[in-house]
Amino acid sequence: MNINLSRASQVLAILFLAAVSALAADHNDIFLLTSTNDATGNQVLVFKLNAAGPASLNFVSALPTGGNGGASGNAGAVQFRDSFGAVVNYGSNNFTRLVRDAHSIRVSGTIALAPDCVQPVSVALKDHRAFVLGSNCAESHSCLLEA
């Protein structure tokens, strides 16, 4: 009798953990982001991974960055780390902060580069800091949101 009770408890514990995992997975959608790098109005295109059945990407939204793109080649960098991200705006000499919530990505303002730092082409993120590489400079900025 004790063995059956023990097994039943283990099965219930496993079912509980599976349910918690399923709920947690529901709150952690997988997104793919890319920059349009449009010279007249840069945008971040957001796609959501649909993992049910054959994997596919569903378009979610186009987020205006508030800046202009315009670089050629491989420019238009978008980076994400944990719940914050950034995209460079080559033609506006700034970068845009991005924030991830459970089921969405949103724009959270822009940060200007120093006046003598122009044409950002790359961004890297570490511990709520953005490291931006311009055509003639490199800068570090805090990406913490103002209260």
Image (cartoon, rainbow, N blue to C red):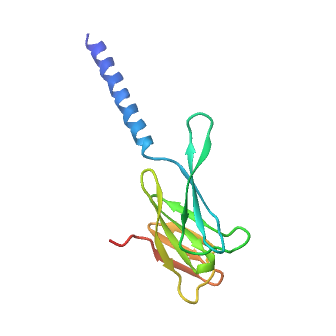
Extreme residue in the right direction: 73
Q: Quadrant of residue 49?
A: top right
Extreme residue in the left direction: 2
Q: Residue 63, relative to residue 40: is it above or below? A: above
Q: Where residue 64 sits in the image (x, y, percent)?
A: 54, 67
Instruction: Residue at 38%, 32% (x, y): give it.
Output: 19
Q: Where residue 44 sits in the image (x, y, percent)?
A: 57, 63
Q: Quadrant of residue 10?
A: top left
Extreme residue in the top direction: 1
Q: Nearer the viewer, residue 60 or 53?
A: 60
Q: Where residue 6 sits in the image (x, y, percent)?
A: 29, 19
Instruction: Residue at 44%, 41% (x, y): give it.
Output: 26
Q: Quadrant of residue 95?
A: bottom right
- Would you say 54 lies left or right of 63 here? right
Q: Nearer the viewer, residue 72 or 135?
A: 72
Quarter of the picture holding the N terminus: top left
Q: What count of labels does the image hold?
A: 0
Q: Residue 130, relative to residue 24: is it above or below? A: below
Instruction: Residue at 61%, 75% (x, y): give it.
Output: 68
- Would you say 80 lies left or right of 4 here? right
Extreme residue in the front direction: 40
Q: Nearer the viewer, residue 139 or 44?
A: 44
Instruction: Residue at 53%, 86% (x, y): give it.
Output: 114
- Would you say 72 lies left or right of 47 here? right
Quarter of the picture holding the C terminus: bottom left
Q: Where residue 3 sits in the image (x, y, percent)?
A: 30, 14
